[in-house]
Image (tube, helix red, strand yellow):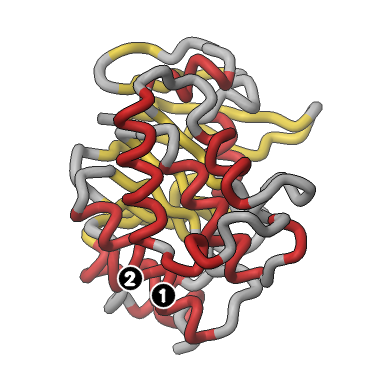
Amino acid sequence: MLELDGIHVYYGNIAAVKGLSLTVHPGEIVTLIGSNGAGKSTTLRAISGLLPLRHGSIRFQGEDLGGAPDHEVVRRGIAHSPEGRRIFPRMTVDENLDMGAFLRKDEEEIARDREMVLDLFPRLRERIGQKAGTMSGGEQQMLAVGRALMAKPKLLLLDEPSMGLAPVLVDVIFETITRIREQGTTVLLVEQNALAALEIADRAYVLESGALKLHGPASELAEDEEIVNAYLGG
């Protein structure tokens, strides 16, 4: 579904991602793990069209994204729930969900997808008319993911969905990611909670200083001594 081939991404003269290649197959949860500054979020931004490539290519469903603008990336079937949530605080929950579907015209399917999102996150149904900025951090994270799902993506990019959440809400978020995959959406996940990410992922890529360090089945990496010591509190 997604293929990154030797991508290089820069902030000015600083290389943030250095020659990264990876693949994501339909129906998978793939996770990127690594320390702060490893290039994980930058990779998602490049896929979304928010950052240009210096070198390399990104292909989605066999087609080169080739510097397509971010709205075109969404139109092709990739939605991004960004780090820090980035919900619209002065809009209601309902209005935020509407913004997720802004490129769509299929009103009946939009209504069905809204019900799907509200079933995934019952708390949002309870808060449907509430200003998003007045909700808790966990509720805002649910809204950020729900808003992305309203684009009806084939591939969902999730950036640090558990950041700043209480442990009980972290469990809810990861259970929901699994349910999203079961409903047919492929997921590329960036997550500081490496243990939780490896528990639900099919495969994992480990980034270090912008470059690929290790990759393989998530279950194997979860038992790798180097990974355990570096990221899992071993």
Secondary structure type for disc 1: helix
Q: Is residue 166 left or right of residue 37?
A: left
Crowding near pointer 1: few (<14 within 10 Å), some, many (20+)? some
* Residue holding disc 1: 172
Q: Residue 1 at what x, y percent from top left?
A: 25, 30
Tell me if residue 77 comes above or below residue 25 in the rendering. above
Mark 1 in CB contact with mark 2 (< 8 angstroms): yes
Q: Residue 160 at what x, y percent from top left?
A: 55, 59
At label 2, the amino acid type is Glu
Report, in whole angstroms, how far the alpha carbon at label 1 lies from the one at label 2: 5 Å
Q: Residue 121 at what x, y percent from top left?
A: 42, 63
Residue 39 can be seen in this image? no
* Residue displayed at 55% across by 55% down: 143
Q: Which mark is residue 201?
A: none
Q: Is residue 135 left or right of residue 139?
A: right
* Residue displayed at 59% across by 67% down: 139
Instruction: Give the camera-side residue of 38 and 131.
Output: 131
* Residue displayed at 32% across by 12% down: 63
Looking at the image, the residue that sits furthest to the bottom is 234
Q: Is residue 151 left or right of residue 67?
A: left
Instruction: Give the camera-side residue of 86 and 30.
Output: 86
Crowding near pointer 2: few (<14 within 10 Å), some, many (20+)? few
* Residue displayed at 28% across by 67% down: 200
* Residue holding disc 2: 175
Instruction: Give the camera-side residue of 193 and 181.
Output: 181
